[in-house]
Amino acid sequence: MRILFLTHGFNSLTQRLFIELTELGHEISIEFDIADAVSEEAVALFAPDLIVAPYLRRAIPESIWARHVCLVVHPGIVGDRGPSALDWAIQDGAETWGVTVLQANAEMDAGDIWAAETFPLRHASKSSLYRNEVTEAAVRAVLAAVERFARGNYEPRPLNTIDLPLQGGARPLLRQADRAIDWARDGTVAVLRKINAADGNPGVLDELFGQPCWLFDAHPCKQSGGVAAAAHSGKPGQIFGRNGSGLLRKTGDGVLRIGHVIRRDASHPFKLPAAAAFPAESAELPDMPCDWEEIGYQEADGVGFLRFDFYNGAMSTRQCEDLLAAYLQARARPTRVIVLLGGGDFWSNGIHLNLIEAADSPADESWRNINAIDDLARAILATDQQLTIAALRGNAGAGGAFLALAADRVWARRGVLLNPHYKNMGNLYGSEYWTYSLPRRVGRARANEIMQRRLPVGALQAQHAGLVDDCFGDLESFMPELRIRASALASSADYPEILAAKRLARAQAEAEKPLAAYREEKLAEMKRNFYGFDPSYHVARYHFVYKLPHAWTPRHLAQHRQSTVRPAEG
């Protein structure tokens, strides 16, 4: 079928549905929801059999839903209505939640039900739940709804004919007054629920050091050692320590690590690590250990597991340096295999655009950041005493996708998305040794095609293309199966031969063209991106960081506009 996506943006759920439906043979075109007239024009141009709205922030106009079946993906259980479905569920501590696919009509979220799925509501941030459980449930529900529509004989169920669970019903927008934290009364669980329910957007409006700001990215911290002593003597709400780039804050009955904030009074009104947003105040605080750390390492059965859970997958200069130090320590251990785990939501998305934008010289910070991530990639590529595995539990994009290719093997969870391209960031050329690692996997012609495509790739697609070596498991089974497979590789009888073949291949490649030459070539291109006459990287980064609304849908997404004259894209 011809299916038109009406969506606010090409977010992770929209990308995943685009891949799933395309693999089933459907022709998908995408239109960003900019204005009613623009959406009406898209419908007229594409003449879709079906319209799917994976991610909208306003209602579909009657001029469209009255003439076409429009399936809306609502991140709530059957009967739930309102713009803050997942927020309320997290803040109220619901045990079960779901996704409903309903037909758009005159009443918001009240249309006939085409499909619905439920899942246990993990104690996690809204962003994490959306990228994982919500996305998986939405894929199942949308595929079921599309199949039912294609059959032509399915009758969707009117909402008023369904027995609703107690949690179902209309809920208003969750406002800052509802999210407000009472530090004297709210315990750790209550505060964490409020911040989790607002993570991603809009954050919880609060204060740090007497300055208004929005809070994001909170983690509980066990009270032990110096943390326990400082927390015991402090008052609820007090900031008493620093943990890396995060700040430690006392609750009514415990301690939270606040990872990211947006300062209301700042010249850079976008998310920054809390310590970076308040540099002077943070510098006066003692640096204290916390049981939640961005980087962690464990060993089992001859395998070292290196976790690096960076917020939104962004890797700053400092984080790259810290991860390199941790990797070199892991490499010095008597293990046979090193597994690079990344984080649960993202493996990596490359350099840290927000910190670059906030720097005194974004060009200089871009240069430092790209060199730091290149240093890490070089260390992985040069490893000759162990086999390395990039284990993608979460999505990977831009430089993060190519950093994964530095490993000997790339294993991915089914459902993971890769965005192996840089061009959406102002024709950024990219580094991370991709001109070495990508062609050696897929060939030079296919590598050029991948770099020009600018579209997401699903894990199975990536395996077929050679970007990924194996794809297995789901949200529950990936980690247990990964441990079994990594242990089997470490103990395999032919491990010595595999390692010897790796060393020989690396030596031959180095003799043909040193890694230093690849790096020099790539950095010459990146220097032009950062310091040259073409400002497109800086403009695109600014738009990305400040989350400026789309003026039009990019041509590579809007297939129905391929032959339509559009303004030149910057």
Image (tube, grey):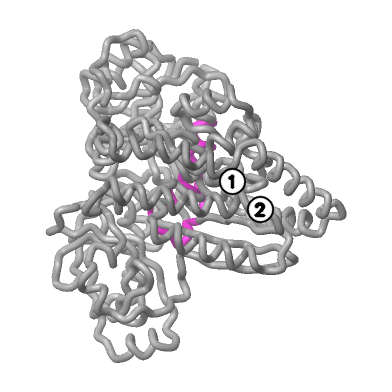
Name the disc covering residue 406, or none.
Answer: 1
Can you say which quadrant of the picture contains the C terminus? top left
Residue situated furthest right in the rendering:
493
Are the residues flagged by discs 2 and 1 in contact, CB closer than 8 Å? yes
Please provide the residue range marked out in magenta: 116-143
Horizontal placement of 108 versus 227: left or right? left
Q: Is residue 141 magenta?
A: yes
Query: Is residue 461 shown above or below 307?
Result: above
Residue drawn 51% across the image and 38% down it? 418
Give percent across and percent down for residue 275.
Answer: 28, 67
Residue drawn 60% across the image and 34% down it? 462
The residue closer to the viewer here, 159 or 392, is: 392
Give percent across and percent down for residue 48.
Answer: 40, 14
The residue closer to the viewer here, 540 or 474, is: 540
Mark 2 lies on a secondary structure that is strand
Residue 528: quadrant of the picture: top left
Horizontal placement of 443 versus 171: left or right? right
Return the disc, 2 or 1, that comes first in the chain's sequence: 2
* Residue at image mark 2: 388
Number of other residues with Cα within 10 Å of mark 1, as a class: few under 14, some 14 to 19, many 20 or more: many
Give percent across and percent down for residue 292.
Answer: 46, 71
Q: Is residue 288 magenta?
A: no
Residue drawn 37% across the image and 34% down it? 428
> Mark 2 is on which residue type?
Thr
Residue 47 visible to an observer of this rendering: yes
> Mark 1 is on which residue type?
Ala
Query: Is residue 424 shown above or below 338?
Result: above
The CA distance from mark 2 to mark 1 is: 9 Å
Query: Is residue 20 shown above or below 414?
Result: above
Residue 115 visible to an observer of this rendering: no
